[in-house]
């Protein structure tokens, strides 16, 4: 494999912009890239995941989105990780080959969520069949048991995984089980693997036990969203404070992020609401979600915007 820049720091799980009639809107991706890089200081993205409604899109749509992100992110983004998981092994393999062909920085795969693997060997067998279709591309397992219902511990999955999947690089860990995460990091292989944590309001705890960064957020409390799309700069300041270390300052950022999330979760916060917040904050029209999800209400948009604007961050914004 060709040496690549190390994946670390924040990874924004991108939403999929759509037109009012529910078609993917590729025309705003260039604005989206520039916004993430210049306004949020986020240079890594995770495309076609849960936040991006990947499993609600056709295979062709997922390919088009991957191609557009790769094109618009060239020389601007450090890493473009493409989620290629699907219920169908053949479709997942097709997406993996496509991601490799367009030069993706990495691919990730969620566990099948209808006919589910029931043990480590079954899950590993599926992952290996997908990874083998992109033999030069870094591979990541996307662990989100609250959505898939697959509760095989990652610690168990890691044992001997490189023998089955030589390209395996790490895990997008979207679960609140910090014990499992800690045991993963404590393994001898920890220096070789990347662990990107996916629960925004617990990020500081994950950093304390050795997570490399974050892919926000696949919520276990409500629906699915990623605050790094619009709070990336604030979260980066938290990472900097943690690194100093200035734990008191890092906690302030974590608590304020939690304050916003606690507020919007009570209102009902998911992909549709994330798109609305992103539209409001960035000025880029993200459009509605795809059915069966429905758009955010005007009441939600007004309350979420007011709450976000009311927060006084330590950097003065």
Image (cartoon, rainbow, N blue to C red):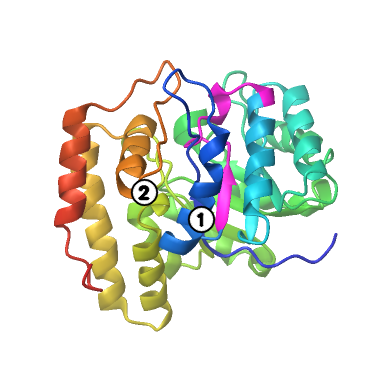
Observer-nearest of 240 and 150: 240
Query: For the magenta stretch, what is the residue range?
Result: 44-60
Between 161 and 132, the residue placed more toward the observer is 132
Residue at numbered disc 1:
34
Q: Is residue 42 visible?
A: yes
Q: Specify whether 73 is left or right of 2.
A: left
Q: Secondary structure at mark 1?
A: helix
Left or right: where does residue 210 sit relative to residue 136? left
- Residue 172 position, x and y percent, is 56, 49
In the rendered image, the vertical position of residue 303 relative to residue 214, given as above or below: above
Q: Please report the residue visible at 66 percent of the width from the left and 67 percent of the height from the top.
A: 6
The residue lying toward the viewer, choosing from 35 and 82, is: 35
- Secondary structure type for disc 2: helix
Q: Where residue 282 is drawn, which disc sits there?
A: 2
Tell me the residue at 43%/79% (across/down).
243
Q: Quadrant of the N terminus?
A: bottom right
Place of residue 88 in the rendered image (x, y in percent of width and height, measured from the top left): 70, 21
Examine the image and state in which quarter residue 185 appears. Answer: bottom right
Q: Give the vertical position of 314 relative to 233 (above or below).
A: below
Q: Confirm whether residue 214 shows in the render.
A: no
Between residues 174 and 69, which one lies in front from this camera angle?
69
Q: Is residue 240 left or right of residue 71?
A: left
**Magenta highlight on residue 185:** no
Where is residue 67? Give x, y as percent. 69, 40
Residue 52's disc is none
| Residue at the extreme bottom | 244
Q: Could you say which quadrant of the image residue 247 lies in?
A: bottom left
Give left or right: position of 23 versus 166.
left
Disc on the earlier residue, 1 or 2:
1
């Amino acid at each position: 494999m060709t040496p690549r820049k190390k994946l670390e720091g924040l990874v924004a799980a991108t939403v999929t912009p759509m037109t009012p009639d529910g078609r993917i809107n590729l025309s705003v991706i260039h604005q989206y890239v520039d916004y993430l890089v210049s306004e949020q200081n986020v240079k890594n993205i995770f495309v076609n995941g849960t936040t991006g409604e990947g499993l609600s899109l056709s295979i062709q749509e997922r390919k088009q989105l991957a191609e557009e992100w790769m094109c618009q992110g060239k020389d601007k983004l450090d890493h473009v990780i493409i989620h290629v998981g699907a219920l169908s092994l053949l479709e997942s393999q097709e997406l993996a080959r496509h991601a490799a062909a367009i030069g993706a920085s990495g691919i990730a795969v969620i566990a099948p969520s209808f006919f589910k693997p029931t043990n480590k060997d079954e899950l590993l067998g599926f992952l290996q069949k997908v990874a083998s279709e992109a033999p030069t591309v870094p591979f990541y397992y996307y662990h989100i048991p609250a959505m898939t219902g697959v509760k095989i511990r990652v610690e168990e999955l890691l044992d001997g995984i490189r023998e089955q999947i030589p390209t395996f690089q790490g895990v997008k860990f979207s679960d609140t089980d910090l014990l499992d995460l800690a045991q993963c990091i404590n393994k001898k292989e920890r220096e070789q693997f990347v662990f990107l944590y996916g629960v925004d309001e617990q990020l500081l705890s994950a950093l304390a036990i050795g997570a490399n960064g974050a892919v926000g957020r696949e919520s276990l409390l409500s629906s699915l969203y990623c605050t790094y799309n619009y709070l990336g700069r604030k979260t980066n300041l938290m990472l900097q404070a943690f690194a100093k270390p200035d734990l008191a300052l890092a906690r302030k950022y974590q608590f304020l992020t939690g304050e916003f999330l606690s507020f919007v979760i009570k209102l009902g916060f998911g992909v549709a609401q994330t798109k609305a917040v992103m539209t409001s904050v960035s000025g880029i029209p993200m459009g509605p979600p795809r059915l069966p999800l429905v758009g955010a209400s005007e009441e939600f948009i007004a309350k979420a915007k007011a709450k976000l604007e009311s927060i006084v961050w330590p950097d003065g914004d």
